[in-house]
Amino acid sequence: MPHNDHSPRATPELGDFSTDYRVLVLVAMAFVVGTGSAFAAWLLLKLIALATNLAWFHRFSVEHVSYAELKPSFLMLIVPVLGGLIIGVIARYGSEKIRGHGIPEAIEAILIGSSRMQPKVAILKPLSSAIAIGTGGPFGAEGPIIMTGGAIGSLFAQCFHLSAAERKTMLVAGAAGGMTAVFGTPIAAVLLAVELLLFEWKPRSLIPVMVAAVVAVAWRPLLLGAGPLFPLLFNYDISPGVLLLCAVVGLSMGLLSGLLTALLYAAEDMFLKLPIHWMWWPAIGGLAIGLGGLVEPRAMGVGYDVIHDLLVNSITAQAVLVLVIVKCIIWIVALASGTSGGVLAPLLIIGGAAGFLEGQYFTGPVELWSLLGMAAMMGGTMRSPLTGIIFAVELTGKIELLVPVLVATGCSYAVTVLLLKRSILTEKIARRGQHLTREYSVDPYEWLRVSEVMVASPQTLPSTMSIDAAINLFKSNERSHKSYPLVDHSHGLVGMVSRADILRWSTETGRSGETLFERVSDNAVLFGYPDEVLARLADRMVANDAGRVPIIDRQTRKVIGLVARKDLLKTRLSSQSAEKDRAAYFRKNKTKNRGTEN
């Protein structure tokens, strides 16, 4: 047996999942994070209500108020601008991380920040969002609470000895808990975590996220109330013709989603051209909000009351048309200005309003088309179709509408994927120089065996070869590799001889008659087995900076193959060919049979 410290038998036992009992520690931590994010959601909603009451009604109250109570006045040109100025100051002198939607910032913390957030983000993000929304910002609370809940999970995790992957789990658990507490949608929150934040599907991360969502929804009746946020009461039989109309709604929402995304980033580009510091941009966005408020006050703020009216058909089509136009304009301008606020609630309003208007010409209750518009707009714009589908069902309690929502959201998702390379969330990250992919697939290294990629019967050197002979070999044209396995008389592995060894030995004196075996027999040698998973061997090659690894038979210990870095690269090439190479085998067989008959 070769002398080594790198035996493949030291690798973990193979299984469907790599999760171990350490997940129980993360589960226990998820109880704390879920609780913290639920209370953070409650606090954020109260802060928004407080800011709204102070800014517009001049009273100290945390009761929810509707912008429908406001009358257009000169005050609308002042309050949003002041709110934007405050946001700009907080962002410049507090933390620039408070700017934006919330979800892209959470993704960045996960991908390039080792899932570590600063304590001030957990304080400044909900505060700035409450000011932005309370002074008229047409945003939702979900983005800020995802960022705030994520910060709570990250900060809690940083108090313990955890890996970056484990901190990510806690960050996402906090984000899912916060979203659950705001909307009462635990399953949709978990799916959002999977589709947008985790960048993996592992029990190690999924189970704690599920626990945090459940803990948050358990706290919700005490903090914010129980039951669906927007319960629907109508009943409607779904026919094939209705499903076709559902597809029409989905396709139109996909097109509208692409338009909104393009307009948003066109507006961002315009702000980038301004000859002033970005600290002043939110004030400009505030001015746009105020002008929109003069036209339609209900376009300002979170707009949960608008969502309710769309879902119960208690608003006129003319009012909806004006509202959605104003909402789109002020939301795009304000969000592009870099203020603090979320995208989910505005997307629900815009999608619901568009579906409502389409429903004026479709059969069935208008409420149905409003709901389908909301789900399709969310799933298509955020590229999270499963989240959009389940979110609509949990938000309304209408599980019988699952299939219509599936059709509409699936069509919207298909349109946006084909039209746009990136979503409204990932485009912002890409503009900061980071590229990410949201397609999950099985790593080919995890299911291929070493025997499927190794070079069989590789060139070897006998252990009895003298050092002088080996030096001459490496200097001659006969050498074709940078290193060779060294074998004994029975072709068993003894060690490896590399070009670096030869260069070192060639400068030494007094090596007359010395063999390779005498120099390398005591050295640790990395090797692999033909039946082991390729990923395990690749991990050991990376850890030991090995370019070529001999493969030995488990029983005889003979060298039967060799794996080099180029063989690992060929594996990636073969996995890509599975996506790109196309063939019609039945047509080939048919052509072949015809040729035989002739």
Image: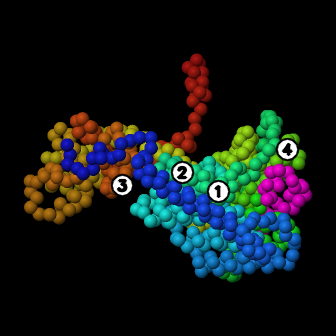
- Mark 3 = which residue? 542
Write the residue at 79% across / 55% down: 308
Q: CA distance from mark 1 to mark 2?
A: 18 Å
Magenta span has 320?
yes
- Mark 1 = which residue? 222
- Mark 4 = which residue? 365
Q: Which mark is residue 211?
A: 2
- How many C-alpha atoms fall within 10 Å of the one at disc 2: few (<14), some, or many (≥20)? many
The answer to which of marks 1 and 3 sits earlier in the sequence is 1
What kind of residue is marked 3?
A: Val
The quarter of the image holding the C terminus is top right
The answer to which of marks 2 and 3 sits earlier in the sequence is 2
The answer to which of marks 2 and 4 sits earlier in the sequence is 2
Q: Is residue 116 above or below residue 522?
A: below
Q: CA distance from mark 3 to mark 4?
A: 61 Å
Q: CA distance from mark 2 to mark 3?
A: 35 Å
The answer to which of marks 1 and 2 sits earlier in the sequence is 2
Per the image, label 4 sits on a secondary structure element best described as loop
Direction from residue 12 to residue 386 in the image, left or right: right
What kind of residue is marked 2?
A: Val
The quarter of the image holding the N terminus is top left
Write the residue at 80% across / 74% down: 57
Where residue 254 sits in the image (x, y, percent)? 74, 51
Where residue 565 sits in the image (x, y, percent)? 37, 51
- How many C-alpha atoms fall within 10 Å of the one at disc 4: few (<14), some, or many (≥20)? some
Q: Nearer the viewer, residue 101 or 555?
A: 101
